[in-house]
Image (cartoon, coloured by chain):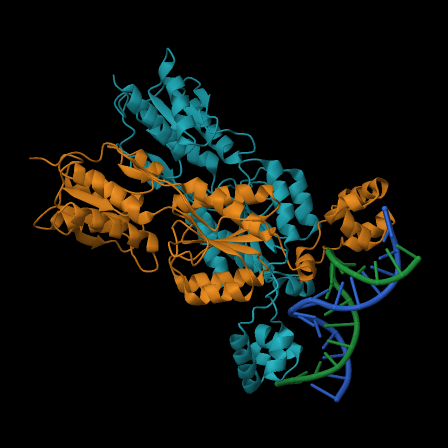
Chain colours: A cyan, B orange, C green, D blue
Amino acid sequence: MDTRTTRSRTARDVALLAGVSTATVSRALNTPDTVDPETLKRVRDAIKKLRYVPHGGARSLRSQRSRMVGAIVPSFDYALYARTTSALQQCLGEHGYSVVLAEHHYDLQQELQVTRQLIEHAVDAFMFVGLDHDPRLFALLEDYGRPFVLTWGVDSDHRHPAVGFDNRAAGHAIASHVLGLGHRRIAILSAPLEGNDRGRERVAGFRAAIAEAGAPAPHVEYVQRIALGAAEEAMHRILKRKQRPTAVLATNDVMAVGAMLACRSAGVRIPEDVSITGIDNTDLGATQVPALTSVRTPIVEIGTAAAEQLIARLEGKEFAANQVMGFEVVVRGSTARPKA
Amino acid sequence: MDTRTTRSRTARDVALLAGVSTATVSRALNTPDTVDPETLKRVRDAIKKLRYVPHGGARSLRSQRSRMVGAIVPSFDYALYARTTSALQQCLGEHGYSVVLAEHHYDLQQELQVTRQLIEHAVDAFMFVGLDHDPRLFALLEDYGRPFVLTWGVDSDHRHPAVGFDNRAAGHAIASHVLGLGHRRIAILSAPLEGNDRGRERVAGFRAAIAEAGAPAPHVEYVQRIALGAAEEAMHRILKRKQRPTAVLATNDVMAVGAMLACRSAGVRIPEDVSITGIDNTDLGATQVPALTSVRTPIVEIGTAAAEQLIARLEGKEFAANQVMGFEVVVRGSTARPKA
DNA sequence: CTGTTAGCGCTTTCAT
DNA sequence: ATGAAAGCGCTAACAG
């Protein structure tokens, strides 16, 4: 069964109604200033009357560009990527590009797969999250000449265009805050690190700061999935250890809030009994009682910068391939000096 | 500058390498069982070797279908739509469809605009949120023969396919819970209602329950945007009123948590001084102290059902156009009997 | 400024 | 089971 039988209006129909050729219809659409104002009006009227929408497939077949950009994120669920993508869309939309969004659930194989699918749909350029990717992904993008930008990290070797911030430095900064309060027995609550360079860098930053301060090496507790429930379970495991830490550094806010839930149900007071920190400064963390100490990361700026870079490249303009943005530790009620 | 110069592999290249015609390449891809197993293998090897990805534009030009589905939501930011869309993608992905996501920021004009853009990109079918839409949207979809499904509501007149739940009943249910606790002086904290049938229905449900209980008509305070800060401001306005309500019904969890923030900063205790309720049962609300009383809505089920319906329609199978799902009031610590 | 023409890469008859 | 050939709707090159 063909559900598409109704599609009929083509440039030909518009041309007929306006009394011009299809070439003129095309010009009216793409380079209106090269068309006589009167003709232009006739064409536009015909377009409106027929509710004509050009066929993007035919267009991309011919012109080799679709004006679509793919944004491939780990998960829609995590509010951060939603905000970044939203900013990306906003900016690209203003320049006439559509955004095709896909998620890969932290599976780099699936990331490769969906990218292939989007290349098939003639997507012009890509935004990816993080620096860790399957080598075949880069080969594919190279093969098909698709510009792309990595986000949420800094590629210090400048092997690929990337806009983001230094996750290791962010981890270092918030760990330093906690160490500065006097904590020495510290645990790390870590998201799964496979194919997750952001998490890995953050943990590396935690460890570096702890080592520099001369404190004992931290226990690292891994969380199965980036979800409140999983983080809560992991925190319960931490709380059951004989040497309970006085501070817990989580690799992101979701992990940290999960830890808070565990403390509440176990009757452990924050920050009196244990200090907790997140990273990313989400609403989820900021609205807790006590409010979560975290790192404000450049969520929206990343999306905007990524969009601007891609637009520049698609239009053959100059662009800054590698951009490093700032972050800021936001101290709130979930951290305090350790007792005695 | 052409950034796409690298694109070269076509069905022709594959055909040449495999020693067959392009027709056979096409068959190998689309109807493999009609191709000799040996030939099939040769073609598949060639495809792999050349890293060939078919050109979707050409395909959709010829076959009139792109295997893309558009999901058009008010905002990526609000976690709910992200979850629904995620479920939609999951389900469609398993059937070989890609999802193109777009947001319209509660602007029905812009919704029409992006839909047009997606039709241009040959999107086969659509999911929209809510029942309120520009009449021209339906005309456009009709014109181009694109199946669509509305979500997050029930179209009791069955004018359009819709899967969701009864927002009015949900509002009625949670208001009844609050009334049952003995509250009579009630305020409503409402999201902007323009083009937002979900909110409107929820408020209608609140009002109906209040009227049925014989309580005085509620004050309705409008929030500028669906954002914590805006809701917090609105709640401060409520708290400044001479007759302070004993309960506040918010049209969703974000509004409710914003109200909680205002109470905290104003030293108003929840639930002793004021009870607060949300709708949608998000993590944001569930993790507050006290935890937010809310309505669990069928977030994931909606996405899955929408996907299943669209797949069925695209494949010409039977489908249930209108599906109504359940919800459930989740009572937590943010509601209690009013004092004295 | 506008029309004619060719062809983008693919699928689909129609032959064989 | 496979190939030859036509053509989907559009844009770019070339005339005029």
Q: Quadrant of the C terminus of chain B?
A: top left
Residue appearing at x 63%, y 58% in the figure: A2
The number of numbered badges drawn on the structure is: 0
Give coordinates of residue A294: x percent, y percent.
35, 35
Front-lying residue, A105 or A242: A105
Picture layout, residue B299 above or below residue A29: above
Horizontal side of B281 relative to B16 (left or right) equals: left
Horizontal side of B76 relative to B286 (left or right) equals: right
Q: In which quarter of the image is residue B224?
A: bottom left
Residue appearing at x 51%, y 31% in the figure: A200
Give coordinates of residue A275: x percent, y percent.
31, 25
Q: Quadrant of residue A60?
A: bottom right
Q: In which quarter of the image is residue B259?
A: top left
Q: Quadrant of the N terminus of chain B?
A: bottom right
Picture layout, residue A41 above or below residue A61: below
Picture layout, residue A181 above or below residue B250: above
